[in-house]
Image: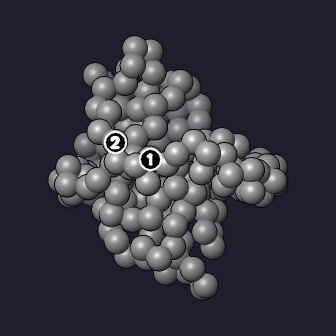
Amino acid sequence: MTPQPAKLKPSEGKAIVHFIRPSGYGRAAHFTIWDGDKLIEENWGKESFQYECDPGKQLFITWSEYKSPLEADLLPNRVYYVLLRIRIGMWRGRLHFVPLNPNHELWNETLTSYRNLPNYTFEKQYFADIERENKQKILDYLVYYENEVKGTKHVNYLRPDDGLAH
């Protein structure tokens, strides 16, 4: 892991999603986070990271024991926040995406802890190896998502107006 400064403002025409996992609970379990079939980060707990991307529709996915999808519809020049929450699973922890906005009950608590978290990223070769090892799994899940999961109670949503204008 390489520390990096937090990027607080998106590049012109882009959106930023802050993924925040303030808890160290379940730290032994790490979770990969994908944007569709592209690996964007790995998270071990008590850390955060930012993902700058094109605006529009995104499908973020994470898994350990349980796959958790987050459909996002992002506007340009906006900043979004997602809390990463772990729960007890049968064999391993289950990570869930909690989309935040200023009206969410966890907004203040999450942003307060976010200010004290380290911000990390990984070297490109490390990501390339993890992505290659898991590519077929994510491709299989994307087909399953389209046929079985999309539109069900198992999907969380990050809406365009959840983002803060910058």
Q: Which residue lies at the image location 59% right of the left edge and 31% below the top edge? A: 57
Question: Which one is nearer the viewer's eye here, 155 or 80?
Answer: 80
Residue 28 appears at what percent x and percent y? 47, 76
Residue 84 visible in the snapshot:
yes
Viewed as shown, does residue 73 lie left or right of 37?
A: left
Mark 2 and mark 1 lie on one chain; the one further toward the N terminus is 2
In depth, the one of 37 and 155 nearer the eye is 37
The secondary structure type at the circle numbered 2 is: loop
106 relative position to 76: left or right: left
Examine the rendered structure and indicate whether residue 138 appears above or below residue 101.
Answer: below
Which residue in the structure is indicated by mark 2? Answer: 4
- Which residue is rendered at x = 34% and y = 71% of the image? 24
Q: Are marks 2 and 1 in contact (CB under 8 Å)?
A: yes
Residue 75, relative to residue 66: is it above or below?
A: above
Residue 2 location, x and y as percent? 40, 49
| Residue occupying the point 66% across, 46% down | 128
Query: In this rendering, would 110 be left or right of 37?
Result: left
Q: Residue furthest top?
A: 12
Callout 2: 10 Å neighbours few (<14), some, many (20+)? few
Callout 1 secondary element: strand
Above or below, 73 against 157 in this view is: above
Amino acid bearing label 1 = Thr
Give the residue pinned by disc 1: 121
Q: CA distance from mark 2 to mark 1?
A: 7 Å
Is residue 71 visible to the viewer in this orientation of the structure? no
Q: Residue 69, how many percent across, how many down?
A: 60, 53
